[in-house]
Image (cartoon, grey):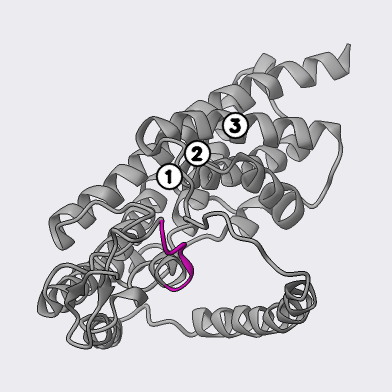
Amino acid sequence: MKETQENIPLAIATVVLGIVVGFSSLILSAILDLTEHYFLNFNETNKIPVNINIFPLHRFASVLIGGIIATIIWYFLQRHYHPVSIKNALNGKEMPLRKTFIHVVTQIFFVGTGNSIGRELAPREAGAAIAQKWSRVLDSYRWLHINDEDKRLLIAAAAGAGFAGVYIAPITGTVFCLEILYRRINARSVSVSLIMSVIATMIGSILKGFEPYYIVGSRDFSLLSVPLAIVLGLILGVTGTWFKQGVKAASSKRATGKNIFWQLPLLSFSAGAIAAFYPQIMGNGRGLAQLAGGNREETAGCGRLSPEGHLQAVI
């Protein structure tokens, strides 16, 4: 009887949060698309992940202006709010919904203007904040009350669902929840995280469809590539760990006061200057990966860059 009383609120929360988080991811995807449309005059696809057709000065201006606008927003936001990580939210620290969403939307806007950062943190933070708010609101309804452990599961699952709704990747969202955040794998956690991620994916696909994020194409790989993949996996795993530690150290020393007024615009100026001639560095790395390793036949419509940053046809 007690188990049933606990399962019903959890089941309801799983479905409701899957829908709400899915729509939050859809909205964030729409904001990204609109930002890219108005600042860079293009619609991102897997064939053209960055706009290589506009003039270099346009790319520079977009990155710089985006950095200046984000600087102003983040300065005033951080005067009264220190961003709460998902890990801290899992441990009970509150993620204020309104301020978290301002932070989330600013991240999406920042990357949409071409600044070189990831876009996956924003939907995860949005999902976690929504789940935390849902759990706390329902504390006042006895029949929908959720215990503390299930609250942690819902926050982790919602973060994964936020990712799934943006990237249309339910398995990735589920694995992220189970292995990175919740770190407990059982029938209960797998069911909640997978169902929530699938629902969010279906809603996110209303805007994004089911096209693959990268175009890889079909190729015949030699068995000799297997040892190389193993070696590269080891090297990149170690390199990725060092990079993660570096990001964590830099994040702990990030500017939150008036120094942000010159540090962030300076970084955007530098990124824009590079992007003017090498647009592959813009955004979250999709452009660099796709233009460097895309299938020749599939990406034939993309073109390539001349040293001056203009488009040439692929022969």
Name the amino acid, label 1.
Answer: Leu
Name the amino acid, label 3.
Answer: Val
Residue lying furthest top: 1
- Label 1: which residue? 97
Pick the quarter of the image with the N terminus. top right
- Label 3: which residue? 198
Residue lying furthest front: 315
Distance of mark 1 from mark 2, alpha carbons? 7 Å
> Label 1's element?
helix
Q: Which residue does the image show at 30% across and 54% down from the upper left?
A: 44
- Label 2: which residue? 130
Q: Nearer the viewer, residue 65 or 130?
A: 65
Q: Earlier in the sequence, mark 3 or mark 1?
A: 1
> Label 2's element?
helix
Q: Which residue does the image show at 56% across and 60% down from the upper left?
A: 85
Give residue 201's position: percent from left, percent from top. Answer: 52, 35
Task: Single out the mark in the foreground, 3 or 1.
Answer: 3
Q: Earlier in the sequence, mark 2 or mark 3?
A: 2
Name the amino acid, label 2.
Answer: Ile
